Image (cartoon, rainbow, N blue to C red):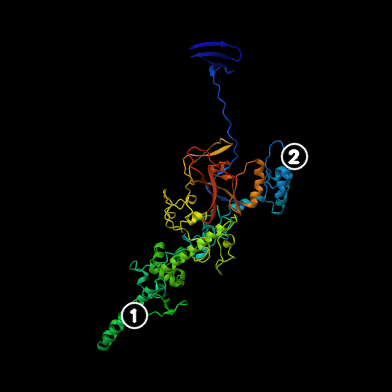
Amino acid sequence: MQIYSSQRGFRGVTCILLLLMGHTFVLLQCTVESIFPTLSTQTLFMRTLNTVALVPIMYSWSPLQQNFMVEDETVLCNIPYMGDEVKEEDETFIEELINNYDGKVHGEEGKACTSVFPLFGATLEGLYMTLNDASPPHFFRYRELTEESDMNVLPPQCTPNIDGPNAKSVQREQALHSFHTLFCRRCFKYDCFLHPFHATPNVYKRKNVETKIETEPCGSDCFLWLVCCMGDCWGCKTNITAIHLKYSLRIIILLSCFVVAFWVHAYFPHLLISFVAPEANSRCQTPTKPKMSPSSSQPFMSDVPLEPVEWTGAEETLFRVFHGTYFNNFCSIARLLGTKTCKQVFQFAVKESLITKLPVNELLSPSQKKKRKHRLWAAHCRKIQLKKDNSSTQVFNYQPCDHPDHPCDSSCPCIMTQNFCEKFCQCNPDCQNRFPGCRCKTQCNTKQCPCYLAVRECDPDLCLTCGASEHWDSKVVSCKNCSIQRGLKKHLLLAPSDVAGWGTFIKESVQKNEFISEYCGELISQDEADRRGKVYDKYMSSFLFNLNNDFVVDATRKGNKIRFANHSVNPNCYAKVVMVNGDHRIGIFAKRAIQAGEELFFDYR
């Protein structure tokens, strides 16, 4: 190695040539001097950095893992930025854009009026002081905020606390008003982001397994030990055979008692009096006067001997809430309350006149339900064939139907929009338009599965044999047609694309037709999509994806990493709109086998 040094003599730069193994390297040695005497002169070599490619331009966006419905923006808050040099076509575009918003641009004031007009604020304050006993306005505001308020006084239109020490006894409707208002019965969430502006039915019809009462007493304080409870409130929950058997046994016991009493009265009359008299004061033999139930001819005992039990307002409210679900299953209600026995719960129900009968549909036999399921299955197959023969490609958003006065016919909104009646509809459970689910025993990834054929995922509440109803935390599910609702997406990476801008790359290999990711974003209306699309077209960057005839998914402001997948006429992925538990969702699937590290493309057209 040979070293040659050359002192250029200007700006403290020294050029050193290195001859190493036939190659010449140039090193620039620099001397840095400071104007401060305390700092010494430093000598170091300059290193030339390699050219780094620029990072592609990216507009700001928020990560999102599920669709987010937003309201239409009918107000243009600001004029879009089109660059420093405004061209004539840009001015024309801005005028057309403003006309779409009623010719107005609304924005928030950046400064208060007092900063723009200093005398204006002083004039208003002086006028206010003159009219209000020379007190400045902020004094009244301070007095309102510092005044002591009664903690027991609730704000207007506020529901009382149902589990506090000072809870009031309210009806079931009032106690559950907030829950019914905020709870979404389609995604089982409170204040969900997918259905915030659409009212859902308040009644969700399902099989009530909670209404099955106990057949054996749960303890010494069980309500089943009360003789008077063996009337209407007990018999209405059992099947006809059990009712006949129960009353037959009671008749036999009663006849036996009459025979014994007649024999004792004939031969030992004084023993009968001494035998009955002591028991006449017992609680079990207290004479009660049966009265007829309004809905049946069986005796309904309202004169049940009540124990002096104190019920708080919270307990009374919770009982009314539980009774709407468990009906006359007083053993379960008592276990939920935790502070009362089921006999005390039963007596309170008698006091409240809440001994009710079950609906008729709860008494259906398994054979009747099985026949109804077969009828729904046949209707489902016919519906599939009609949709295949229909040449219309329009897809409408699903809304649960609610017409209790008549069955689903041509006036039903589900039939009018060519949608199936789902489990959220308020129609009869044996509706011929109700989708019954599949009974597959395989992976449900071929057209042999009716759910796959109808371009919908298997419903865990309807498809009970394919594996869609397995536990939600199960990593391995036999059904392959429930990936979107379970969130079984692949690991995606974001990096500069080989085509343009940013691109989406997959970290793991996938097979053909395997689910990759869901295309998520803001759920907007078609009108809002038209207004936003004009701005996106001007920027030559759009993330709009048509969902159905009513809504569009916009991943411009909010979305996930699949939004960066670029367009290609020879893609390795394809998009498909799938019905998932009543909601249309966009799934991205592999069009062919994709290796790890490949960039994802799908056809935008």
Q: Is residue 269 left or right of residue 153?
A: left
Residue 597 in sight from this viewpoint: yes
Give the labeled residue for mark 1. Answer: 251
Local secondary structure at mark 1: helix
Residue 561 position within the rendered picture, expressed as x and y whole percent measured from the top left: 54, 42
Classed neighbour count for the residue bearing mark 2: other residues with Cα under 10 Å, few (<14), some (14–19), many (≥20): few
Looking at this view, is 170 or 123 the one in front?
A: 170
Label 1 crowd (10 A; few <14 / some 14-19 / many >=20): few
Q: Nearer the viewer, mark 2 or mark 1?
A: 2
Q: Amino acid at mark 1?
A: Ile
Disc 2 marks which residue?
A: 88
Cβ–Cβ under 8 Å for marks 2 and 1:
no
Q: Is residue 18 above or below residue 104?
A: above
Residue 255 or residue 126, whichever sits in front? 255
State the image coordinates of residue 418 (x, y, percent, origin top left).
Answer: 57, 60
Q: Secondary structure at mark 2?
A: helix
Residue lying furthest left in this view? 267
Q: Quadrant of residue 265?
A: bottom left
Residue type at the position of mark 2: Glu
Single out the residue that lies furthest toward the front. Answer: 389
* Rendering coords of residue 462 (x, y %): 46, 59
Image-based side of 391 in relation to 172, left or right: right
Closer to the camera in the image, 117 or 514 = 514
Q: Is residue 372 above or below residue 82?
A: below
What is the spatial separation of the Cα atoms under label 2 and label 1, in whole angstroms? 99 Å
Q: Earlier in the sequence, mark 2 or mark 1?
A: 2
Q: Position of residue 417 (x, y in %)?
A: 59, 60
Callout count: 2
Compared with 559, 157 (above or below) is below
